[in-house]
Amino acid sequence: MIETDRCILRCFEEKDLDSFTMYRNNEEWMKYQGFKNLTKEEYRKALLVPLNMESGIQLAVALKATDNLLGDLYLIKNEKTITIGYTINPLYSRKGYISEVLKGLLPKLKTDYFDCKIIAMTEKENIASKNLLLKLGFVYDGWIDEWQEEVYVYSK
């Protein structure tokens, strides 16, 4: 789907499920995330499905050299808005992998969905995620009480 210097953004495969289950069920690491604390079978049913942007797609972020799962990326298109979310396995955090993948993906989304606004949401306390969004060219756009999250809009 997308290749960067070190990473591949691709569909999930059966071989990814153990790693995905391990980091998604890490309570401390996943404190700012939804879609967690499920069984491997529940993740299998959610991840190994045909892709559909309108119902949401979860993509694997893998290391290009080994194809090992590093993390994941979520995309959903709702009318004229594309919402993105991302998670990295704590074993691979702070190495720039998600930043690298998003730098490759965001321009493609802008080209393919030129009439859509690209947004990301994060909790106020998730400083690392907010800093990443700002570094990538997102700007703060407000607060959603219903979800208790800040909204950032891609501005490039």
Image (spheres, rainbow, N blue to C red):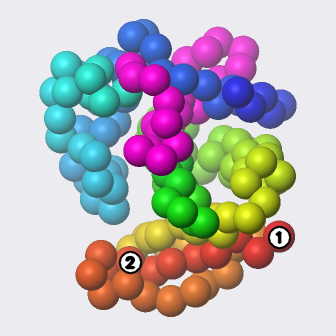
Q: Is residue 119 above or below residue 62?
A: below
Q: Residue furthest front?
A: 79
Q: Which residue is mark 2?
A: 149
Q: Quadrant of residue 15?
A: top left
> Considering the image in quadrants, where does the N terminus appear?
top right
What element does badge 2 sit on? Answer: strand
Q: State which tag comes first along the sequence, 1 or 2.
A: 2
**Residue 12, horizontal then vertical, whole percent:** 48, 22
x 77%, y 48%: residue: 112
- Give the quadrant of the C terminus: bottom right
The residue that mark 1 highlights is 156
Tell me the crowding category of disc 1: few under 14, some 14 to 19, or many 20 or more residues within 10 angstroms, Cα based: few
Please tell me which residue is depicted at 29% across the width and 21% down the height of the picture: 44
Look at the image and say whether residue 9 sits in the magenta stretch: no
Q: Is residue 94 visible?
A: yes
User: Which residues, given as a range, are shown in magenta?
Assistant: 48-72
Q: Position of residue 99 (x, y in %)?
A: 69, 51
Does residue 136 lie above or below 39 as drawn?
below
Q: Is residue 77 above or below residue 60?
A: below
Q: Amino acid at mark 1?
A: Lys
Amino acid at the residue labelled 2: Glu
Residue 128: in sight, yes or no?
A: no
Please indicate whether residue 144 sits to the left or right of residue 63 in the image.
Answer: left
- Cα separation between marks 1 and 2: 22 Å
Q: Residue at x 83, y 52 (%)?
A: 111
| Residue 52, magenta (yes or no) | yes
Residue 35: x and y, percent? 28, 46
